[in-house]
Image (cartoon, helix red, strand yellow):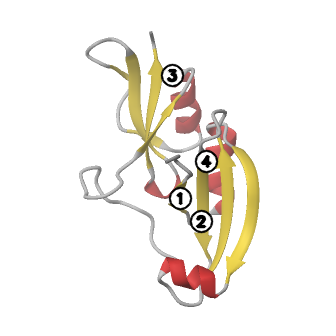
Amino acid sequence: MIFRHLGITITNIDESLAFYKDALGFEVVRIMDESGQHIDNFSDLSGVNVKTIKLKDKSGAMLELLKYHSHPEAANSDPICRIGCSHFALTVPDLDALVEKIVNMGYSVNCEPQFSPDGNVKLTFAKGPDGVLLELVEELR
């Protein structure tokens, strides 16, 4: 088995691309408008009209941003302890610089970067567009 992608439902394409592409360094691979019975079938919704944006990082790991034009929803405000997928983690080369960049873009971090008890990493959590929670980790050793 090979990990294929992580899907993130978004409310604003431009804002999300500025965050995932410009701030985090993901590269856009493909943008598609999708609708039809096959989309309705696997989404378990009716009348779906969705724009999908596939992005990849330097390792080839993929994110899929989904903007549902037909089924708008409110941004995520669930706590990290909710059941289900709570966050995803990214290894970054310079955590302090990235934190400064995303805070200057108007996003928040849960705390200043913290060192792990073993001293191997420095990390924090950030809330990106639509309240998506990301763990940002800089490997120190």
> From the viewer's perspective, is 129 left or right of 135?
right
Seen at 59% across and 32% down, the residue is: 101
Task: Locate the C terminus and report the quarter of the image it occupies.
Answer: top left
Badge nearest the viewer, 4 or 3 = 4
Q: Earlier in the sequence, mark 4 or mark 1?
A: 1
Badge nearest the viewer, 1 or 3 = 1
Badge 4 amino acid: Met
Q: Earlier in the sequence, mark 1 or mark 3?
A: 1
Marker disc for residue 96 = 3
Residue annotated with mark 4: 62
Helix, strand, or loop for circle 3? helix
Badge 2 amino acid: Leu
Q: Earlier in the sequence, mark 2 or mark 1?
A: 1
Marker disc for residue 66 = 2
Q: Quadrant of residue 57?
A: top right
Regarding residue 107, the answer to whether it shows in the image is yes
> Could you tell me if the residues under marks 1 and 3 are in contact, i.e. CB atoms within 8 Å?
no
Seen at 56% across and 29% down, the residue is: 98
Badge 3 amino acid: Asp
Helix, strand, or loop for circle 1? strand
Distance CA(mark 3)–CA(mark 2):
29 Å
Helix, strand, or loop for circle 2? strand
Q: Is residue 127 above or below residue 13?
A: above
Q: Is residue 139 above or below residue 49?
A: above
> Could you tell me if the residues under marks 4 and 1 are in contact, i.e. CB atoms within 8 Å?
no
Residue annotated with mark 1: 7
> From the viewer's perspective, is 81 left or right of 113?
left
Q: Earlier in the sequence, mark 3 or mark 2?
A: 2
Distance CA(mark 4)–CA(mark 3):
24 Å
Distance CA(mark 4)–CA(mark 1):
9 Å
Seen at 25% across and 16% down, the residue is: 117
